Image (tube, rainbow, N blue to C red):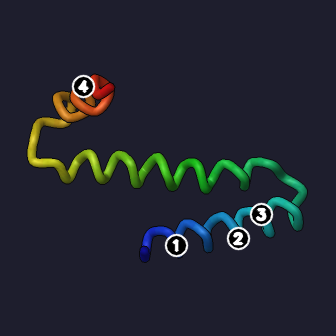
Amino acid sequence: MLFFIALLLVTGASIVFAIKKKRAVFLVLPFLSMFVYFIVQIALVPMPFFETVKFIFSLR
């Protein structure tokens, strides 16, 4: 739940900065933070990193 609130705050701040500064590059920040969170969660799995990634993408 804490991550969801933090992601909402990052997204809101990114939208505000993108509108104020008139730069679309600020809209990349929410996607980047979700990607970093995804990588951290994979790293927390007690298996080797690449085996974990293979397992996640082999699920059907």
- For the residues labelled 4 and 3, say whether their Cβ atoms are less than 8 Å apart: no
In the image, 16: left or right of 37?
right
Q: Dividing the image into 4 quarters, which one contains the C terminus?
A: top left
Please give the residue where the numbered disc 1 appears in the rendered image.
6
Q: Is 35 situated above or below 51?
A: below
Residue 6 versus residue 57: which sits nearer the camera?
A: 57
Q: What element carries label 2?
A: helix
Residue 22 in picture, x, y percent from top left: 90, 56
- As measured in the structure, the alpha-carbon distance from the residue carrying label 4 to the one carrying label 2 is 34 Å
SS type, badge 3: helix
Left or right: where does residue 18 sit relative to residue 27? right
Nearest the camera: 42 or 23? 42
- Image coordinates of residue 44 in percent, x first then y, are 20, 53
Query: Residue 27: image x %, image y %?
Result: 72, 52
Residue type, mark 2 in image: Ala
Which quadrant would residue 21 be assigned to in this image? bottom right
